[in-house]
Amino acid sequence: MKHTSWFGIIVLYTVVTLLFIYFIPNDSPFSIFTSLFGFIFVTVIPGYCLVNLVFKEGKLDIVEKAVLSVALSFSIAGMSGLFLGLSPIGMTTASLTISLSVIVVVLALLALLRKTKLVQTQNPEEPKP
């Protein structure tokens, strides 16, 4: 179960960030949470999900994983903004948050499927459902 706990944390963080963005007004004293959660959501989470998808567990140490997560997050956010700016949808706050949320959940789900399949192939004595 350990290899699936990060997936729940990522999805929960995405939901909490969306709740903060859409339900806390900008003039509220709690708007600092919106900025903090949004900053981390854009600068770390998408790249972290992609790193979990691409690299096997134990291949990278924590520093390499952190640097790659930040660099890939900026790349993903930039590409998302580029595609939204060129599409008829346009680049608004709502379209950016929804697109990044979808990207994060899809990448996390793909990484979860990959890790689950990897664990099943490493433990062949466990019965398959």
Image: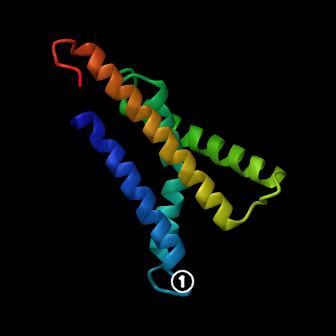
Kind of residue sitting beneath label 1? Pro
| Residue located at (16% from left, 18% from top) | 126
Residue 121 vs residue 67, the one in the foreground: 121
Answer few, some or many: residues within 10 Å of disc 1's Cα (few below 14, many 20 plus, some between 14 and 19): few
Residue 84 left/right relative to 50: right
Please give the name of the residue rendered at 59% of the width and 58% of the height, measured from the top-left corner.
98
Above or below: residue 60 compared with residue 27:
above
The answer to whether one can see residue 67 in this image is no
* Circle count: 1
Q: Quadrant of the C terminus?
A: top left
> At which x and y percent is residue 51?
48, 32
Residue 68: x and y in percent read 52, 34
Left or right: where 6 falls relative to 73: left
Q: Judge left or right: residue 78 versus residue 105.
A: right
Q: Is residue 93 visible?
A: yes
Q: Quadrant of the N terminus?
A: top left
Residue placed most toward the observer, 23 or 120? 120
Percent x, y for residue 116?
32, 28
| Residue 52, x across and y down, in percent | 43, 32
At x 28%, y 34%, the residue is 3
Question: Image check: 3 left or right of 52?
Answer: left
Q: From this viewpoint, which residue is outermost toward the front?
A: 129
Relative to 72, say whether 97 is above or below: below
Q: Which residue is mark 1?
A: 25
Say which residue appears at 75% left-offset and 60% top-offset. 91
Rendering quarter of residue 61: top left
Indicate whether 64 appears above or below 49: above
